[in-house]
Image (cartoon, rainbow, N blue to C red):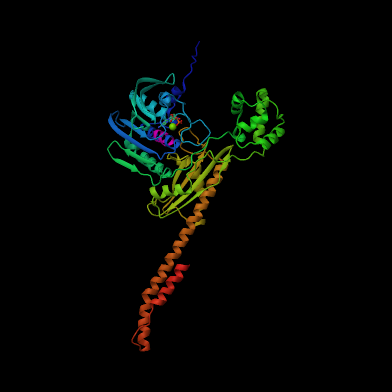
Amino acid sequence: MVTQTFEEISPADFFYRNRDIAGFTNPSRAIFASIRELVENSLDAAEYVMIPPDVYVRLSYVGEASPESAIYKLRVMDNGSGIPPQHIPSAFGQVLFGSKYKLKQTRGTFGLGGTMSVLYGQITTHQPAFIASSTGISKIYMYKIMIDIQKNRPLILDRKIILNKERWRGTVIEYSLEGDYIRAMPKILEYLKQTALVNPYANITFVDPRGRLYKFMRATTKMPPAPQETLPHPYGVDVETLQRLIRFTRCNTMQEFMKTHFHRVGELTASKFLTFAEIPASKSPKKLKREEIVRLVQNMKRFKEFLPPDASCLSPLGEELLRTGILKELKPEFTAVRQRKPSTYSGHPFIVEVAIAYGGNIPQKGDFILYRFANRIPLLYDEASDVSFRIMKGINWRRYKISPDMPIAILVHICSTKVPYKTVGKEFIADRPEVKREILNGMREVARDLQHFLSRQEHVERERKRLGVFSKYLPKIAQFATKLAGRQEPPDIKKLLDKVKTIEENE
Ligand SMILES: Nc1ncnc2c1ncn2[C@@H]1O[C@H](COP(=O)(O)OP(=O)(O)O)[C@@H](O)[C@H]1O
Ligand SMILES: [Mg+2]
């Protein structure tokens, strides 16, 4: 008889076996993903304390690993919040451990990226990771850790505490990993450039293995307002969430419960809803039976009178900052930027920002260049699967007198507490009708702006030509006419030319 063995694996073990789904597919993708995850942590950390981020990334060559890959040392340093000392080992040594499970907009979501980077480094080089961090207190904590993958726990190899005389605040992480920088280089540089574009208030420095220095300097110190933490909206709640809320609530009545734990539910809405769901307002939430909980969730989705979620938990870039970023990194001749009104899908609020950039340094590629962003992260892979790509392809651009052979870039930024990514690798966004509608309308608006700009430009060009003809022939005509009339002095044509000019300027 064949006997089966059953065993349990830890989350770290799961991601060790399935690195692909977190984006660590091969040496080239892995080095890209590592830099990206750590840069995102640094940006999140600086924004958390509302300080314009200073992120320093250094990748240095250590030695050859195989014909296609090498060992590198990666160091990322920031001026962000720092990590409380007791959490430093777990922050980088435990998968699914983090501070961003709250309902508000952040780049990180799963408590995965930083640890995955360290884990990948460990399994490819067998070296520990070094982390130093301080929250700005009198001490800096330094750790040398490895990950016990089977247990999903950090192993602390060494710990040092030094005095922080300068009250430095931030985090440094350094570890070795195997990668293919040569192949990853274009993507990494593109990633940094686009990150600089949607974070125009950040300084990002990158020193690559060849010693080349790339600097993306901030163009402003203005930052978008920090997102507020929010409560779940009734439309987005499932049975599990509701059960958890019931377990920890201190409310004694359903009326109180609805008001306390749900987003935008006040006295009136709560009582209307409870009547609709046929649940007594005075009933204790702890007394709800299982079937009642299931029915409550179903009714939450059916009830039409909940107010839509507000967008205070979101932190879109805003038109001014997006324009600053575009002008700084893309240097176009013209740009139009639109922020759409907040909207929701399945109870999750989101905001779409769309921009178009034309001419100047935008290359002419035979097709539009599409830049996609989600929660201020550039998305660089799997473009053709992304909702924005398909919408862009579906628009009849000729209506706006725009064609793909023009130097045009289109930018789409989606912010949400829950970006509808299709994978944990955070590469492309799924089609949701609500999201689609906002992107489509945004693209149409900026397309119209560009159309106006182009037709104005065409008009000015025509006028310039007309004036050119006048100023070329008028003196000749004047001379000829003088001769014909037998006069000595030609008439003053300057007045006439000025008149033509002012007509054009006033138009
Ligand atoms: N540079 C950093 N500065 C401050 N905190 C950090 C930094 N990097 C990671 N952390 C902390 O470690 C946690 C885990 O990071 P990570 O594994 O990347 O997951 P996520 O970013 O999805 O939460 C974060 O939630 C954050 O609390
Ligand atoms: Mg992260």
The kind of secondary structure the magenta stretch mainly shows is helix
Q: Is residue 428 visible?
A: yes
43 part of magenta stretch? yes
Q: Is residue 244 above or below residue 366?
A: above
Q: Is residue 295 visible?
A: no
Residue nearest the observer in this picture, 311 or 134: 134
Q: Is residue 429 left or right of residue 326?
A: right
Q: Residue furthest bottom?
A: 486
Q: Is residue 306 left or right of residue 426?
A: right
- The x, y position of residue 459, in whole percent, is 45, 65
- The x, y position of residue 311, in whole percent, is 55, 41
Place residue 293 in its image quadrant.
top right
Q: Is residue 295 above or below residue 358?
A: above
- The x, y position of residue 255, in whole percent, is 67, 31
- The x, y position of residue 113, in whole percent, is 43, 30
Give the image quadrant in which the ligand numbered 1 is located. Answer: top left
Q: Residue furthest top?
A: 1
Q: Is residue 40 left or right of residue 178?
A: right
Residue nearest the observer in this picture, 291 or 392: 291
How many numbered markers are drawn? 0
Residue shown at 50% from the left, 52% from the top: 446
Residue shown at 64% from the left, 29% from the top: 257
Q: Is residue 243 left or right of residue 56?
A: right
Q: Which residues are magenta?
A: 37-44
Place residue 435 in its image quadrant.
top right
Residue shown at 38% from the left, 44% from the top: 218
109 part of magenta stretch? no
